Image: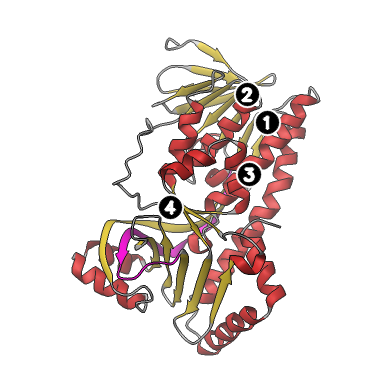
Amino acid sequence: MENNQLHEVDITVVGGGMVGAAVALGFAQRNFRVALVEVYQPKLEFKPETISNRVSAITRASENLLKQLDVWTDILAMRSCAYEQMHVWDATGEGSIHFDAAELGEASLGYIIENNVISQALWQKLEQQDNVELVCPDKVTGVSRNKNVSKVQLESGKVIQSALVVAADGKQSPLRDMLEIKTRGWLYDQHALVATVTTENGHRETAWQRFMPDGPLAFLPLNTDADKTCSIVWSTTPEKAERYRDMSEQEFLQAITQASEARLGRVLAVESRAVFPLELKHSEDYVREGFVLIGDAAHAIHPLAGQGVNLGFLDVVALLDIVANAKSQQRQIGSMHVLRQYERRRKGSNMTMLASMDIFKRLFGNRFKPLAMLRNRGLTLVDNLGPVKTFFTRYAMSLD
């Protein structure tokens, strides 16, 4: 396609991360003509020797979506780790809770998978679709809407015209700003340090999380030869996160072994330390005529329960269903009447999860001693109340 040439498709997706690639593939498999615009050229070669420090805890609902998109087998062929149990404990007392998939009659609680593994599987499948145009690297510089047609102007000079534009371009979403959709939220007093570590003892297909006053530390199991490799997410003050990132390897290994109370023995090695700020952000609107927000473009959440990408995949499920249904009824897929259905289905649910994680963050980060005592008792109480714990587990797994 030559520059400045007007190109027509049914749906334009802006942003080719996990959520954007998933919705583009889903629409293509439902016989829509799709253009996917992505700023970066993705790397599609899987290198087993390289482990990414950005991972996601994939729920059963997200697993089901990836199976429907026919990429789950490809993901498992690269690298993933099913985790069967989860141990959570409070650093300020004796409170703890233990989740076990066997108590639910399930094979696992979920999967820990590197983000780039999911993205690679989705992009490889996208490249096989005759009705998908991958426009990358390129970025949107302007948008407009006229007579049931949305247009995106690209930096390259290309113009893509479609009935619907999906903004999946992340929590800083330039497209959201172009549509003048406001957000509410705040930066947390925490940064997350992520890295890959090797531990003295095996992780036993278990996720481990310790809540400390400055923030939670999670060890997420990865599937390697010795099963002694974990991805860590350590949420703490910005100053401490940067100090941990920059200190010598030996100092860091001592610090994280102590912070984890050596639950997996000593931490023996660390790779790929990185830090990023944490925030809560929620878009006041998810839709405009001919435009819709999904994933982090609509909502950003604290990572303490690993729900970020799972909320995005639930957005994908809802949007695919609603738009495909509108097409079958020969209705305008970019109309506000259709898109409001998506907003009603997802906005309240997302808001509930964002608020819940914000409450958890503040509850477990509070140093007030009476509250800490109550928190510890609450953890232990829930651990001993089978039906209550089952409810929380099924909700976190998106089984209900």
User: How far is mark 4 from mark 2, CA to CA?
Assistant: 37 Å
Label 1 Cα neighbours within 10 Å, binned few <14 / some 14-19 / many ≥20 = many
Which quarter shows the C terminus?
A: bottom right
Q: Secondary structure at mark 1?
A: loop
Q: What is the count of numbered marks?
A: 4
Disc nearer the start of the sequence (1/2): 2
Q: Quadrant of residue 66?
A: top right
Say whether marks 3 and 1 touch (CB < 8 Å).
no
Label 3 Cα neighbours within 10 Å, binned few <14 / some 14-19 / many ≥20 = many
Say whether marks 1 and 2 touch (CB < 8 Å).
yes
Residue 276: say if magenta: no
Q: Which residue is mark 2?
A: 145
Q: Which residue is mark 1?
A: 289
Q: The disc labelled 1 sits on which kind of residue?
A: Glu
Rendered location of residue 382, percent (x, y): 64, 79
Q: The disc labelled 3 sits on which kind of residue?
A: Asp
